[in-house]
Amino acid sequence: MYTQFISRSRQLCSVVVLSFACSLVSAADAPTATDVDDPWEGYNRAMFSFNSGLDSVLLKPVAKGYKKVVPTPVQKGVNNFFSNLGEVSNLTNNLLQGKADGTATSFFRFVINSTAGWGGIFDIATELGLTEKEEDFGQTLGYWGVASGPYVVLPLFGPSTVRDTGSLIVDYTNYDPVALLDLTSNGELGLTALDVVDLRAGFLAAESLIFGDHYTFIRDVYLQTRERAVRDGEPVKTQHDVNDEEGSWGDDDSWGEDSEEDSWGDDVDAI
């Protein structure tokens, strides 16, 4: 149970971290006020404040100490280890979405890193050209057309939507690879604590990118990036894009039926 909780938290927070960079590079694609479905903003802001307060007095100080004391190569190995465990969820959801390439990639990444990578400590698969195809059940639901629903901030989990919150049930019942380690309850709890600290330490550098109202910033870039994740990075096709595709090659251009009457038509005999 502990590892399932943290696995989902890692996915959610990783999306937010990546979204900071996306928001700076593609600000034009960011949701506007009219695009954001946030009918529970009062509750969400209160929960956001609760999570932030808990973080400031507990997680953040520990994460700073971890970042300062633990050597960088060790931190990288820990991060790789937990990312490798996430390949089980990636594989499952790529399969549910019918993505053969993603399913094969996740499978071979897990096998290669679990063996040649010493249990996932070393990311050998990426060096071989197998890049991670991160998927969760919320993305799977979105892939099959389920709307995200209103934005909601969850206790401890942080930013989410109604769709992603509902997907937690499936994520909890997903196969837990930590069971292979045959850990005791204390061992599993310790592993979870390490994952929490490692996750929070990786989040430290992204904090400097937040500007303005923190709640609004995180909400907007989270929703943007989750939508991009569902579409595998493909932009939303607007009516303007559709018109551009039709362009000058449509039925009314100079290459259509009227071309028979232009200067290349019958009047050429008059030359």
Image (cartoon, rainbow, N blue to C red):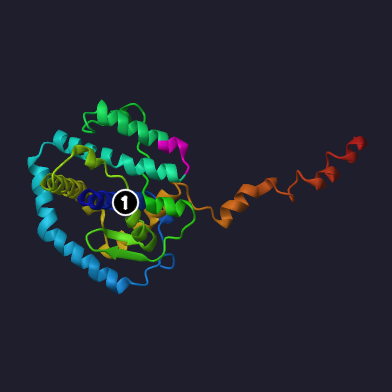
Say if residue 78 shows up in the picture.
Answer: yes
Q: Farthest residue in the bottom direction? A: 42
Locate residue 2 relative to residue 130 in the image: left or right. left
Locate residue 44 relative to residue 36 in the image: left or right. left
**Front residue (pair 58, 145):** 145
Locate residue 190 relative to residue 252 in the image: left or right. left
106 vs 137: above or below = above
Q: Secondary structure at mark 1?
A: helix
Residue found 33% across the figure and 32% down from its top? 109
Residue found 53% across the figure and 52% down from its top? 237
Q: Farthest residue in the right direction? A: 270
Magenta region, main secondary structure: helix
Callout 1: few (<14), some (14-19), or many (20+) C-alpha neighbours within 10 Å?
Answer: few
Residue found 23% across the figure and 71% down from its top? 46
113 vs 39: above or below = above
Q: Which residues are magenta?
A: 98-103
Query: At label 1, which amino acid type do we have?
Result: Thr
